[in-house]
Amino acid sequence: MSLLGENFMTEEGEFVINMGPQHPSTHGVLHLKVWLDGETIKKVQPHLGYIHRSIEKMSERLSYRNFIYATSRMDYLSAHINNQACALAVEKGLQVEVPARAQAIRVLLAELTRLQSHQLWWGCTGLDLGAVTPFFYAFREREAIMEIFEETCGARLTQNFCVPGGVMYDVNPNFQKRVKDVMQQIKSKYREYEEILTGNVIFENRTKGVGYLSKEDAISFGVTGPTARASGISCDIRKWFPYDGYEKLDFEEVVMEGGDCYTRYMARIEEMKQSVHIIEQMIDNLPEGDIQGKTKNVIKLPKGEFYQKVETARGELGVYIVSDGAASPYRIKYRSPNFSNLSALETMSVGTKIGDLVAIMATIDLVIPDIDR
Amino acid sequence: MFLKDYFGTIFKSIKSLLTGMRKTGYYFTHPKEILTEEYPDNRATLKMFDRFKGEVTMPHNENNEHRCTGCQACEIACPNGTIKIITKQEIKEDGKKKKAIEAFVYHLELCTLCNNCITSCPSDAIVMAQTYEHSVYDKTQLKKILNKPGSKIMEGVE
Amino acid sequence: MNQLLEISFSSLASSIHSWLSSAIANATILNVVEMAIAGVCLLVFLVPLCFVLGYMERKVAAFMQLRLGPNRVGPKGTLQIVADTVKLIFKEGLTPNASDKFLFNLAPIIVVVVSMLVMAPIAFAKNFQLWDLNIGVLYVTSISSIAVIGILMAGWSSYNKYSLLGAMRSGAQIVSYELSVGLSIISIVIMTGSLKISDIVMSQADGWWIFKGHLPIFISFVIFVIASTAEINRAPFDLSEAEQELTGGFHTEYSGMKFAMFLLAEYINLFVVSAMAATLFLGGWMPFHIGHWEAFNHIMDFIPSSLWFLGKTFAIIFIIMQFRWTFPRLRVDQLLNLEWKYLLPISMVNIILVTIMAIMGWYL
């Protein structure tokens, strides 16, 4: 037993510390119980449930028009993509045709959402590794994207712009010009990101070869999104199961071999470039036409089960609706990307140092409310 | 060979560190790049976008008339029970009974600003206002009655 | 004019002493009064110094991060740090229940006292030095390494695992980086042949060491700045308080005035380290002279020596602050790698070069 008292160490001389639920680097109320041998991590155990709001249960008493808004609060950084997934699932049940313009607007906003989410992640990665300044540079570009959302959707974070059958409004008249300006701005700042963080020798040392996740492990844990694609798995829903007209777009799926923190970091940076590419090819070719398909005022889905998956900024989000023919779903289940990604944390971090655990969590890009829902 | 690698690493490292310092040094010497908005001071010039969702309001015209028929479509469309409409029966000149609103109760503290009530309103009686300062000392102050006292429905709105 | 500005410290002290001894007969009381005067003078100098450094740090950080920084309290926000201090004074100083209360309260005092002690031999201006002892450099290096005891004490007595981890990291870090700091100081001592700080400053009358020492001295200057940034636990070497990893490290459990003392010590250490770098490598209070440009040298002489000293010191403080707001933090094993695999071997080879230079007289 140690001098410091009985509860300070385990029998094996391991040191148990609780990271979270209030900890600067867990980005929310994630609680990690960490067993340490000196600075080396022996075991990590995530404890969940601090921000469980029972969004699935709540959705069962809301109508099909209303339950969409609640999903903005799951992965709040991909709020629009969550809404899109729900709208798509309802449309699948209704067999309603979504007009081309509505699809294009949805995809544009979804890619902007992905871009702003990755911007925030880039800033937070720097912050977690101890560099405070990149956070502010990332927010400068993110703020420009947020203004696009504010102008068109009326809200910055929880846009609630998707409705079953289309989108709520047409885009703002300034939309195209503003988006083009922001894309120019973001493209000109990539070099700056490289100078301040990517090329920095301390950053490279902190991330290269740290938190290795093998292809097999990634598959068995159900890891998706950029985290999985950095381990060499091709799993982009936009490519494999296209929705809302992604099949007509020209973009590359970013698949990288490596599986360490640095590869995950580079995969996300590349994804940002692909998102900019998608937005640039769409912004001048917005199709004309309606913005909403024909839906009844009170939506009733036919009896049956409907599943729709989309690619959020963090991975694969699945919406599974069981309908008994009533005006609200009988049962809803969300397959959230962060829950699966978190489960791979222990595999990645055993044998590394405490500082690496922070780097690994930063590069998985966890959003805690999405884990608990 | 070993020495070459050793010093190569050192030079590369120092170069990468200096690149980063040049960037922060650039921003230090260029105060024009500062983006801070001094919020409470710029209230006069701060203008929200037209679509900004601040709170639900009910516009009245100069005769203190609104467009709300009391159909409760917004109450049904609201996911959180933010809106409560209390109706009354009004007897018109020709003796017919007509539904009218007594009070349009709006709980801003429950509202998630999802815009569903606005899109569901058949008579465009409610709109989103571009206000953004909602903080109060007591949450009961956020319970609002949107129709003004003594107001009545506009002619011709069914 | 120049003479007026540069009042000799020793003459000032001796005149105060003679005036006091004529007023107070008892030798013991005289000593106590003199000590009290010295203590008050130190506080009067150090507290505003920390205010200036705190304000500077916030402004430097803000400008690098596209922000404005403090600008509400007082003109341009200059009184912000005063307001913060007042807040910290009124805050409750919590002591954890299971902590070792004596050590817990002693630790911040040790840290502050040590950093104040190191101020003694620094030459602030021409003839203005508190204590010009003949082993000044040795005194600075040895006293400043006592600070680690305070940090270890704080981490151990807090009864917090984060604090303990932070303190252990700090121990390993300071003990290692002492070596590089020592070796780069030795390179100057070899060139000067004296440990006395006034001698070191005087030896740079005809050119600062960083110019006349060629590459080897420049390398030891770089190593000195890096290693002393590590020694005072500032980012990117702030592993002992690593906010993102250890939530605050050794001072996790401290609040109120005890926390403020750690902050005070950090800023004093920052000043001391920069002042040492300025004294050893940049000529202390010596003005900048170029060879035979008599007119230019004369203009340079006209600038008060205290301004020269503070200007050099603050330039180095700015660089150390820029380190903090640019770089990510190192990992604990990489921190030790940097010291033992890079800084220490290089400074050892460097010492040989400096010694050859000193023997052959290749400087100037």
Image: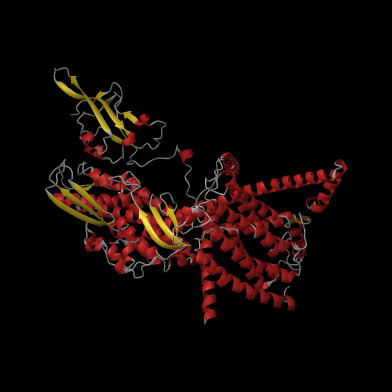
- The x and y percentages for residue A303 are 11, 48
- The x and y percentages for residue C96 are 53, 46
Which of the 4 image quarters holds residue A214?
bottom left
Residue found farthest to the bottom? B1
Residue A97 seen in render: no
Residue A138 seen in render: yes
Q: Dividing the image into 4 quarters, which one contains the C terminus of chain C?
A: bottom right
Using the image, determine if residue A35 lies above or below residue B71. Answer: below
Identify the residue shown where x is 70% and y is 64%.
C280
Observer-nearest of B119 and B80 = B80
- The x and y percentages for residue A109 are 30, 52
On the picture, is B75 further left or further right than B1? Answer: left
* Number of numbered discs overlaid on the protein picture: 0
- The x and y percentages for residue B147 are 29, 26
Image colouring: secondary structure
Which of the 4 image quarters holds residue C343?
bottom right
Using the image, determine if residue C19 lies above or below residue B155. Answer: below
Observer-nearest of C272 and A243 = C272
Observer-nearest of C172 and C271 = C172
Observer-nearest of A233 and C288 = A233
Identify the residue shown where x is 72% and y is 74%.
C363
On the picture, is A359 further left or further right than C99? Answer: left
Identify the residue shown where x is 21% and y is 41%.
A61
On the picture, is C125 further left or further right than A236? Answer: right
